[in-house]
Image: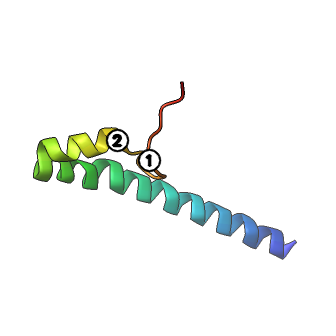
Amino acid sequence: MDSLFYLFFIFVISLLAIIMFHLQIKYVEEPFLKQEFKEQYLQYYQQVNRYVGKRTGFK
């Protein structure tokens, strides 16, 4: 029973960490990059996903 509690605790902490990283990227880092690099960053932003890999079009 204790191990189940620890697994749940680790899951909750991991979920909170993921949410915190997402908020940091979306509301702190991206606005800074948009302000600092302007058009160059906007072009880059349109070509890639936020977290994983390059955008590809499905036809």
Q: Position of 22 compared to 37: left or right?
A: right
Q: Secondary structure at mark 2?
A: helix
Q: Residue furthest front?
A: 59
- Residue pointed to by mark 2: 47
Q: Residue furthest top?
A: 59
Classify 10 Å Cα crowding around label 2: few (below 14), some (14-19), many (20 and above): few
Residue at the spot 14% in from the left edge and 41% down from the top edge: 39
| Image location (x, y in percent) of residue 24 | 34, 56
Q: Position of 28 compared to 53: left or right?
A: left
| Image location (x, y in percent) of residue 37 | 13, 51
Can you say whether 8 is above or below 6 in the image? above
2 and 1 marks in contact (CB < 8 Å)? yes
Residue at the spot 72% in from the left edge and 64% down from the top edge: 8
Residue at the spot 26% in from the left edge and 50% down from the top edge: 30
Front residue of 57/35: it is: 57
- Residue pointed to by mark 1: 54
| Image location (x, y in percent) of residue 18 | 51, 58
Q: Quadrant of residue 13?
A: bottom right
Q: Secondary structure at mark 1?
A: loop
Can you say whether 26 is above or below 7 in the image? above
| Image location (x, y in percent) of residue 12 | 63, 61
What amino acid is found at the position of numbered circle 2 in the picture? Gln
Tell me which colouring the rendered structure shows.
rainbow
Residue at the spot 47% in from the left edge and 51% down from the top edge: 53
Q: Position of 28 compared to 8: left or right?
A: left
Q: Which corner quadrant holds the N terminus?
A: bottom right
